Amino acid sequence: MAKSLKAALSVCFCAAIAATGLTLLIRKPRLYSENENRYLQQRPKLSAADIADGTWQNDITDYMSDQMPFRDTWTAMQAKTQLLLGKKDIGGVYIGKEGHYFEKITDDDLSRLRYQSNLDAVAAAAKFEPTVPFSVMFVPSAGTIQTQYLPDHAELYDAENLYALAQYTLQDSCTLVDCSEGLKAHKDEEIYYRTDHHWTTYGAWFGYQAFMESQGMTAKPFEQMNVHPISTSFYGTLYSKVLDADIIPDTVSLRYQPPQCSVTIDGQEAALYDMDALNAKDHYEVFFGGNFGEIRIQTQSSGGKSLLIFKDSYANCFVPYLLDDYSTITMIDLRYSDGSWKDRLLEQPDQVLFLYEISNFAQDANISAMAAALQTQ
């Protein structure tokens, strides 16, 4: 009896493996995972060179993982099992208190050499246009501000060391804007999403306030910004790594009826808010529809000032607060830029701002290339 059961289980196991392999072989690969908000590994082409250097082996492993049948279901089941076992670190996400998720980024995940190279590139850009004032605002990640929600013994990168190095490197070329104090003073409030890595529209207001003060300008009170919720069913990028159906979704808010403006994205007419994003998974993409190489905004501000922003996605919900204060706002995301950012810098804007979440800045491989590109001018 025992032998028959063992044989039956072996047959079932082999059949499951064979069915999975056959499915991977004949099924058309999925191109994009809306749940994970990323493109999936496609079936790699077989070549002797790729086999020799190990590229094909790595790609086929990623392909099998990404294209696994019922991948989301298996991920959710695995995460649920780990949660029931009391694990607080699942798929690179810390499971915090009161439904808060945190991205697990430690010092081992950050290259000090790359971070220093990126800082040097910012300093080089500032010296390239010495008549234009440069500012840098590094947004703290949620785990370094809302520490009260972190699970016990959670390890994160040394944020104070990163800020100190930035201050030392940029002190002669840039103004370092500190938005952390305002965020810390409101750490018990919804300044970051619980299921996503971004700050909320409310949290971004404290960044706006700090930036305006650094420029000797007056920030409009949050109450006058007419911010209202437009979604109460947002499941962010951190949720996608855990897929816990019991988690409460986030609320996304935006500045309702902002000042009139015209928006072009990579040269094409667009809108400040992409309301169609609310019909997809990533509701944060309501701001401009996501990330692009260049977003240019013309406002009706009477000030006549121009602002050039080098940014990551944290700037997307920050910029609508500036529409009263700048006539032209240009946003450059170096990850998607075609190199036209050099022309924008040569236009000598009234102000340049680098706005990044600090661990994103430390890991971005595109920033350090700025210094070399500027030397070719």
Image: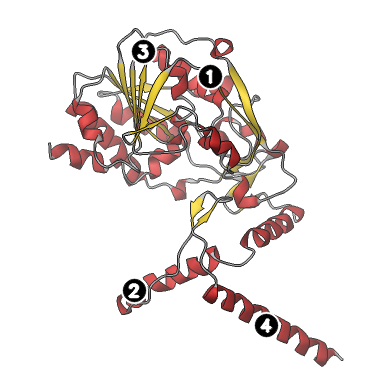
Q: Mark 4 sits on what residue?
A: 15
- Residue 166 drawn above or below residue 92: above
Q: Position of residue 5 (x, y in %)?
A: 82, 87
Q: Tag 2: Cα neighbours inside 10 Å, few (<14), some, or many (≥20)?
A: some
Asked whether the beta carbons under mark 2 and mark 4 sit within 8 Å of each other, the answer is no
Report how far apart the C-alphas of labels 2 and 1 lie in the structure: 51 Å
- Residue 132 drawn above or below residue 68: above
Report how far apart the C-alphas of labels 3 and 4 lie in the structure: 67 Å
Residue 223 position by quadrant: top right
Per the rendering, the mark at residue 37 is none
Q: Earlier in the sequence, mark 1 or mark 4?
A: 4
- Residue 252 drawn above or below residue 217: below
Outermost residue to the left: 377
Q: Earlier in the sequence, mark 2 or mark 4?
A: 4
Looking at the rendered structure, the kind of residue marked 3 is Gln
Report how far apart the C-alphas of labels 2 and 4 lie in the structure: 31 Å
Q: Mark 3 sits on what residue?
A: 215
Q: Secondary structure at mark 3?
A: loop
Looking at the rendered structure, the kind of residue marked 2 is Asp
Q: Position of residue 101 (x, y in %)?
A: 63, 41
